[in-house]
Image: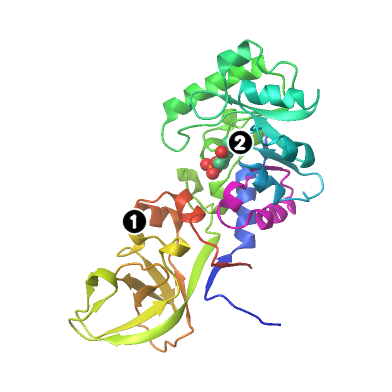
């Protein structure tokens, strides 16, 4: 059989994913710890993430859409899946066929769900101030969620990693919601939210970014580890003379004779142009800076200071999420979810 290898790979650390989940779970005073695996597990591969976390006891998973839910089937034994975008006009077919619950967010969605048959278990989203998805607290107070069999009653924090006053107001609103709505579990906290205190944790926490190495609360530093390391292979080595330039726009000029390594990686893979000038990688234990602009599928590194380099060698990109976010202006979420399909995802 023809075997085609990829010159691009994401090295994914099973042990770090697990230790991140365990650390997050250990912040709880009784609350269960689930996992947000939407957007293909933040780019890592949703099914792989789910199976690995299920293996250590994670039971509650969250995706955005029914297509994402379908891609996770069959669910591991004892696991539950919630579809955050709820029940749109075209979702009734998938919702009756797929073993996942919609997170109902509007009176229209609730009506659709009731039309599919009484008493089926569902989740609901109540908006406590973000004004994104969810029923208003007043709608819930007026009985909008009456007659539903609610497993998880959710709300979502808008500023858990940014603004304590906003979070406190949302917490107070959600405490009201817990008195208005009868549900098996209440759930408010994402990654940053669960670090705000046990009062934010209710019955079920829903971390996403921190599972995958994002640092979104000071307490995570040193406890949450990097899961994803992108690596690219050297396609060509060349020597560039003083005064010559590298790449589109001639933005980089050699000030010394420079050994340049060109790798298979570009903005089409999610290594966006904002990394140019800030990026770096590791080669044979040495830090090597990127030079020039990032092309669609190519990127150059200055490897002058590294001995013993050959075409075919792999460069590991510096991809500490907090650090790269700081340097590029991208969020830690963007840094993961843009990583493209040309990467071979290798768990180790
Ligand atoms: C994405 C998402 C989460 C996870 O958020 P993180 O900030 O990645 O931890 C939790 N709940 C909802 C509703 C989400 O959309």
Judging from the image, the colouring scheme is rainbow
Pointer 2 residue: 85
Quarter of the render that holds ligand 1: top right
Is any atom of residue 318 visible in this view? yes
Disc 1 crowd, CA 10 A, few/some/many (<14, 14-19, 20+) = some
Q: Quadrant of residue 258?
A: bottom left
- Using the image as rendered, state which of residue 229 and residue 45 is in the foreground: 45
Secondary structure under tag 2 reads: loop
Picture coordinates of residue 334, whole percent (x, y)? 46, 51
Secondary structure under tag 1 reads: helix
Question: On screen, 44 above or below 241?
Answer: above
Does the magenta portion include 52? yes
Picture coordinates of residue 309, whole percent (x, y)? 42, 87
Pointer 1 residue: 327
Left/right placement of residue 262 relative to residue 5 reads left
* Residue at x 41% of width, y 36% of height: 162
Disc 2 crowd, CA 10 A, few/some/many (<14, 14-19, 20+) = some
């Amino acid at each position: 059989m023809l075997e085609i290898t990829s010159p691009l790979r994401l090295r994914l650390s099973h042990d770090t994913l697990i230790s991140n989940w365990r650390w997050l779970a250990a912040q709880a005073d009784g609350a269960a710890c689930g996992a947000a695996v939407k957007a293909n597990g933040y780019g890592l591969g949703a099914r792989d993430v789910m199976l690995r976390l299920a293996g250590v006891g994670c039971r509650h998973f969250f995706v955005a859409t029914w297509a994402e839910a379908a891609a996770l089937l069959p669910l591991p034994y004892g696991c539950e899946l919630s579809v955050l975008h709820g029940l749109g006009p075209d979702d009734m077919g998938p919702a009756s066929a797929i073993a996942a619950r919609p997170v109902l967010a509007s009176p229209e969605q609730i009506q659709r769900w009731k039309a599919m048959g009484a008493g089926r278990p569902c989740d609901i989203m109540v908006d406590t101030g973000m004004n994104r998805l969810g029923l208003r607290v007043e709608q819930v107070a007026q009985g909008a969620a009456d007659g539903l069999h609610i497993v998880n009653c959710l709300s979502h924090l808008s500023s858990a990693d940014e603004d304590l006053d906003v979070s406190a107001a949302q917490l107070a609103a959600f405490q009201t919601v817990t008195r208005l709505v009868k549900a098996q579990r209440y759930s408010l906290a994402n990654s940053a939210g669960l670090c705000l205190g046990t009062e934010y944790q209710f019955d079920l926490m829903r971390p996403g970014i921190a599972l995958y190495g994002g640092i979104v609360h000071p307490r995570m530093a040193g406890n949450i580890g990097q899961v994803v390391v992108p690596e690219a292979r050297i396609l060509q080595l060349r020597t560039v003379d003083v005064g010559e330039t590298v790449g589109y726009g001639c933005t980089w000029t050699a000030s010394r004779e420079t050994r340049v390594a060109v790798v298979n990686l570009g903005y089409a893979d999610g290594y966006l142009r904002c990394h140019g000038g800030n990026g770096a990688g590791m080669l044979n234990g040495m830090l090597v800076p990127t030079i020039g602009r990032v092309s669609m599928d190519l990127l150059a590194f200055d490897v002058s200071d590294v001995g013993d380099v050959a075409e075919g060698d792999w460069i590991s990109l510096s991809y500490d999420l907090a650090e790269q976010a700081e340097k590029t202006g991208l969020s830690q979420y963007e840094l993961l979810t843009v990583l493209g399909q040309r990467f071979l995802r290798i768990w180790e």
